[in-house]
Amino acid sequence: MGVALRSAAKLALLVTGAILLIMSGLVHAGYITVDWGAVTKGLEDGAEAAGGYIQLALADLSAQLAGFSAGVLMGFKFR
């Protein structure tokens, strides 16, 4: 199962990278124009939404996260 999942993840990353390269080439060649203002606004809105969710999660789970982090660090140290 792990080998199949790793292979699927590699394939997904390869396809995503190829699409980004093709899109970048089309933008550079002038076939596509990008509204960077809309892209920036979308990224900022997404970051604000994610930031609010992260703050809520950290406020609720701070004790568990501290214990988990300490356990992980101890595991790396004793390895």
Image (cartoon, helix red, strand yellow):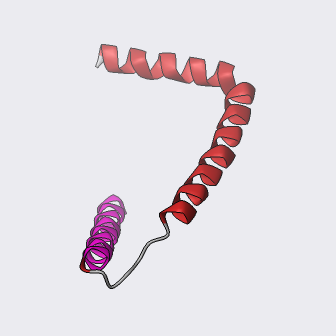
Image: magenta residue range: 1-28
Q: Horizontally, is 13 left or right of 36 in the view?
A: left
Task: Please tell me whether residue 73 is drawn above or below residue 49 in the rendered image.
Answer: above
> What residue appears at the point 50 percent right and 21 percent down from the top-left corner?
69
Task: Please tell me whether residue 65 is drawn above or below residue 56 in the rendered image.
Answer: above
Q: Quadrant of residue 56?
A: top right
Q: How many marks?
A: 0
- The verdict on residue 79 being magenta is no
Q: Horizontally, is 68 left or right of 45 in the view?
A: left
Residue sticking out furthest to the bottom = 31
Quadrant housing the C terminus? top left
Q: Horizontally, is 78 left or right of 39 in the view?
A: left
- The verdict on residue 16 being magenta is yes
> What residue appears at the point 58 percent right and 18 percent down from the top-left corner?
67
Quadrant housing the N terminus? bottom left
Task: Please tell me whether residue 29 is drawn above or below residue 6 in the rendered image.
Answer: below
Q: Observer-nearest residue: 32 or 52?
A: 32
Q: Observer-nearest residue: 59 or 63?
A: 59
The chief SS type of the magenta part is: helix
Q: Quadrant of residue 3?
A: bottom left
> What residue appears at the point 59 percent right and 59 percent down from the top-left corner?
42
> What residue appears at the point 32 percent right and 14 percent down from the top-left corner?
77
Residue 15 position within the rendered picture, expressed as x and y whole percent measured from the top left: 31, 74
Q: Quadrant of residue 65?
A: top right
Residue 4 position within the rendered picture, expressed as x and y whole percent measured from the top left: 32, 67
Task: Please tell me whether residue 56 is drawn above or below residue 33 in the rendered image.
Answer: above
Residue 20 position within the rendered picture, expressed as x and y whole percent measured from the top left: 32, 70
Residue 60 position within the rendered picture, expressed as x and y whole percent measured from the top left: 75, 28
Q: Horizontally, is 8 left or right of 59 in the view?
A: left
